[in-house]
Image (cartoon, rainbow, N blue to C red):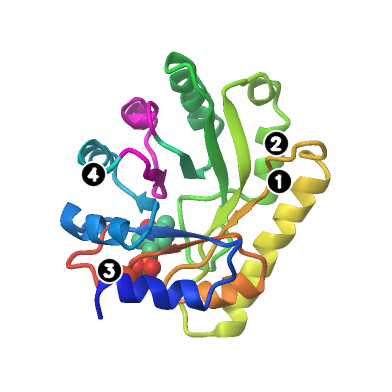
């Protein structure tokens, strides 16, 4: 099956309001072009340089999402054009994104990443840590950041109950934050969860944005985080 057939079969089983981020990391521009011609407009990458290079050559109405861990010193390269940064998990990074957004005279949308999986990971916050950051005056004074919601990755397992439990946990964190800190913020709307292997479970548990790579583009030749 080709890229456009793969995209269509995902679209046909996904409710309309859910955004599909086509995760194109490691894939050549020609393959992204094929997805673009099939109507895809949101692409996700996890490396700054690759994101920059692809943005450079592909049509300008594409929404580029940075889905991977972002180093502070690299924010400046994507700040002029990035639509959404998914994996933000520190005040330091928020401050740098705000600074670069200001320099580019724009606001940059971000999601706060939560650690919901069983696996050990350096990335993603606990709810307590997130609340601490989001109520810190150093954060609340940042005017060029829009926090649009939350993001998380479930444990890599075939245990559906475990995955469902983790997605429920993220949904509940989202609701808690929405009801408390983001009371009046209509922009706090997104739950980015679900990948090729688990997006159907994620949708059942409240995902608004799925990040799908291999199911659209086929397996990647090399796998890097
Ligand atoms: C690579 C990646 C995906 C997509 O993974 P697939 O299993 O190929 O769908 C989703 N989210 C993040 C953060 C990724 O790094």
CB-based contact (under 8 Å), mark 3 and mark 4: no
| Segment colored magenta | 60-81
Residue corresponding to mark 1: 128
In the image, which is nearer the foreground, mark 2 or mark 4? Answer: 4
Residue corresponding to mark 4: 50
Q: CA distance from mark 2 to mark 4?
A: 33 Å
Classify 10 Å Cα crowding around label 4: few (below 14), some (14-19), many (20 and above).
some
Q: Residue at x 70, y 36 (%)?
A: 132
CB-based contact (under 8 Å), mark 3 and mark 2: no
**On screen, 138 above or below 51?**
above
In the image, which is nearer the foreground, mark 1 or mark 3? Answer: 3
| Label 1: element kind | helix
Mark 3 or mark 4: name the one nearer the start of the chain.
Answer: 4
CB-based contact (under 8 Å), mark 2 and mark 1: yes
CB-based contact (under 8 Å), mark 2 and mark 4: no
Q: Residue at x 25, y 81 (%)?
A: 1
Some atom of ligand 1 lies within 8 Å of the CB belonging to the residue at label 3: yes
Q: CA distance from mark 3 to mark 4?
A: 16 Å
Residue corresponding to mark 3: 217
Depth check: give the residue in front, 205 or 10: 10
Q: Quadrant of residue 27?
A: bottom left
Q: Quadrant of residue 17?
A: bottom right
Classify 10 Å Cα crowding around label 1: few (below 14), some (14-19), many (20 and above).
few
Q: Residue at x 35, y 65 (%)?
A: 213
Q: Quadrant of the C terminus?
A: bottom left
Residue corresponding to mark 2: 132
Mark 4 or mark 1: name the one nearer the start of the chain.
Answer: 4
Quadrant of the image where one finds ligand 1: bottom left
Q: CA distance from mark 1 to mark 3?
A: 37 Å
Query: Where is residue 187 drawn, in percent x and y?
Result: 68, 40
Mark 2 or mark 4: name the one nearer the start of the chain.
Answer: 4
């Amino acid at each position: 099956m080709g890229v456009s057939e793969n995209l269509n079969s995902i679209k046909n089983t996904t409710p309309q309001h859910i955004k599909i981020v086509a995760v194109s990391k490691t894939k050549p521009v020609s393959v992204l072009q094929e997805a673009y011609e099939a109507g895809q407009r949101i692409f996700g990458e996890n490396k700054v340089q690759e994101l920059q290079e692809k943005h450079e050559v592909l049509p300008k109405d594409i929404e580029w999402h940075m889905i991977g861990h972002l180093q502070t010193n690299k924010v400046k390269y994507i700040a002029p054009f990035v639509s959404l940064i998914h994996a933000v998990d520190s005040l330091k990074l928020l401050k740098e994104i705000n600074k670069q957004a200001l320099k580019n005279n724009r606001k940059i949308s971000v999601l706060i990443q939560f650690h919901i999986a069983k696996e050990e990971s350096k990335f993603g916050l606990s709810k307590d840590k997130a609340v601490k950051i989001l109520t810190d005056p150093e954060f609340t004074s940042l005017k060029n950041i829009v926090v649009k919601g939350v993001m998380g990755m479930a444990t890599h397992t075939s245990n559906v109950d475990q995955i469902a439990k983790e997605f429920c946990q993220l949904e509940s964190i989202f609701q808690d934050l929405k009801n408390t800190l983001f009371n009046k913020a209509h922009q706090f709307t997104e739950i980015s969860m679900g990948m090729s292997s688990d997006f159907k479970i994620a949708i059942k548990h409240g995902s608004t944005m799925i990040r799908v790579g291999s199911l659209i583009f086929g397996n990647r030749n090399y796998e890097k985080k």
